[in-house]
Image (cartoon, rainbow, N blue to C red):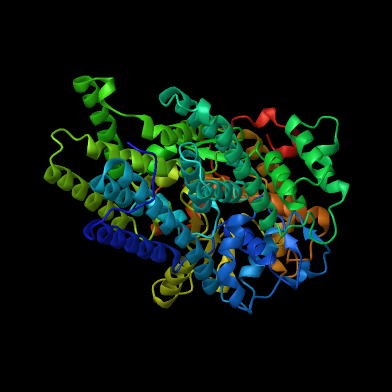
Amino acid sequence: MEPLSFKSHPGATVPCIATILLLLFAAFCYRAADDTSVTFDEPIHILAGYSYGARDGPETLTANLRAAQLWLAVPLRSLGLHYPEALQAIPGVVVDVEMKVTRDFIHDPRHDPAQILRASRAAITVLGTVLGLVLFVWSRRLFGDAAGLLTLGLYCFEPTVIAHSSLATTDIAATLAFTLAVAAWWRLLHRVSLGNIMLCGLATGVLAATKISAGLLAPTVAAMLLARLVWRRDLPGEWGLLSSAAAGALVLAYGVIWGLYGFHYASGWRLTDSAWTELLVPQATPVQRVLNCLRIHELLPEAYLYDFNTFINNLGGRRAYLLGAYSVEGWWYYFPVAWLTKTSLPTLVALALGVATVGVALLRRGRDSLDFYPLVPLLAFGVIYTASALASPMNIGIRHLLPVYPMLFILAGLGVKLWPGSAPRARGLLVAGLIAWSAGVAWNASPYFLAYFNPAAGGTGNGHRILVESNFDWGQDLPEVARWLEHRAATPATAGERVFFSYYGLGDPARYAIHATLLPQDPDFRPPTIYDLKPGTYVIGATMLQALGGPRVWGPWRPSFERVYRALGLELAPLYAEARTSKSVGAPGRLSSEWAQKVALYDELRFARLCAYLRPRSPSARITPTTFAYFLAEENLAAALDGPPPFGAETTIKGLSRLPPGRVDFLR
């Protein structure tokens, strides 16, 4: 087999089917993007992308590189948006932009949040569609029409792919950039031409300006080069030409990075040394010393270096939840569990068939009967990226494993080519069956693609017991919560009931006319306020229910929480009693700083205890797969707040004791 080529084969039937699959993919993405609130990461990407071209305010730096943010903000230029007034007077660039500012930008009264989300999400859907086309061409070139269609069908109907192709984030952009860069370098290793050099340079530069993990491209290219030497021993004579071509591609990639940052080192005023503290201390790591050298000599844009430095400083100490356990250092098996539970069964079956057919072919015909050389880029990148993911302490979502999915979809096509008998009709039926099954999965998952878990894992209904946050509940449900509450308010039997609401995300409940007493949120913008938990309807998102969210109090209910909760309850009891008879006592802004801090902490602890009590209990209703409603009477609240401590199987957070006190919550 020859290296990857993007030349199409003649004939209209297969391209027509591929076009239909891509259109269905776009339709599912539209369905997923429509009628949902902004998810946790979207506001910061949207504001950053918009700020890069804004004339009425500075650029914002986000610890995420620029290319994808620039792209998703392209449709926003024509919407007449208003830059946040809180940032307009800041010279140069904005670092550490507050979450509230990003939320307020989306929900500015002069803006239409739905319009902003539709536009920026559509830009990412375009990238997802392009990625599907690339995978179809690659797989078809390697294994034939049937394999190409299977690869495309699995891709187009995979719920996790649809979910992240319909969000204004950088994950699908990075997946496309990785795929193109790997393919481009593989082409260049086999044919040096001006076009291949340019393709390689552009793809590498865009990738390097999209995701910091772009560094994994280097060992991937090294592995591909090694395979080239082992399989094709004609390289030494071409070494000079290939070296020059690679150097040219890298120079072009370097220029692309500068171009995406406007060909200037700094935008406006330069960052002061206080922004580079980690680079200047004697304890700086070798990577930080390299970054500081690049900064001093201005070899890369300042914003690029700052984002890179911020990212590596935040690698450790990230909250993670898996199967009822909590950690700040991750688990090596986090991504295997996420992949096995969130990948659809048709994809898993197709991959299993591929592995089985390869095994059968090797047993029957021997190793020399199969040409594994064209699979080198897929296997090299897949192994290197997966190994990096397994070693990473950052366990925050299956989305970080997305760059591996394209390789798996293509490898699934290998099983079609090697299917015993190789009869075209049999292959066609196999492909049609798998695609139809996959389409059925997508149809049943719609529109809750983000929350999808396969039936072997207990389905979406069991997802919150396995993973949360961007794997399940990322703040997308506000419109449906608003409609559900509106319906109950209009129903005589439930009209006038008290409603309490806890939400994980950066949507604005007030903008959706959600009338409820707000419980602790993440992020929490509420001023410290004294209020009682009373009988009524408690609406709680899955991430908050599992106690992964929360400004300070998070993780399993543990003895230290119980002790402080009881002590604060006794200390604040007179203040709460007085507040019940006087509306002015305990109102927002009326508490002293000391009492406000105690009230806020008690509020978090009380809610955390309530969630620990509710976790093993079935909700009274599920508004969406990821948002639960509990109808709690007086006796339920008494048991939750004053009953025996609701300790679960887990009472610790893995790795918490290894982190410095400043990096963890105040209670160990």
> Which quarter of the image is occupied by the N terminus?
top left
Task: Name the residue at the front extreme.
Answer: 237
Rendering quarter of residue 19: bottom left
Residue 511 on image: x %, y %: 57, 73
Residue 342 on image: x %, y %: 39, 44
With respect to residue 87, does 141 lie above or below? above
Residue 506 on image: x %, y %: 59, 61
348 relative to 636 in the view: left or right: left
Rendering quarter of residue 405: top left
217 or 227: nearer the viewer: 227
245 or 418: nearer the viewer: 245
> Which quarter of the image is occupied by the C terminus?
top right
549 or 314: nearer the viewer: 314
661 or 526: nearer the viewer: 661
430 relative to 100 in the view: left or right: left
Which residue is found at the position 68% from the left and 28% from the top? 657
483 relative to 419 in the view: left or right: right
Q: Is residue 145 visible?
A: yes
Q: Is residue 331 visible?
A: no
405 relative to 318 in the view: left or right: left
Residue 86 on image: x %, y %: 77, 68
Which residue is found at the position 22% from the left and 20% from the top? 363
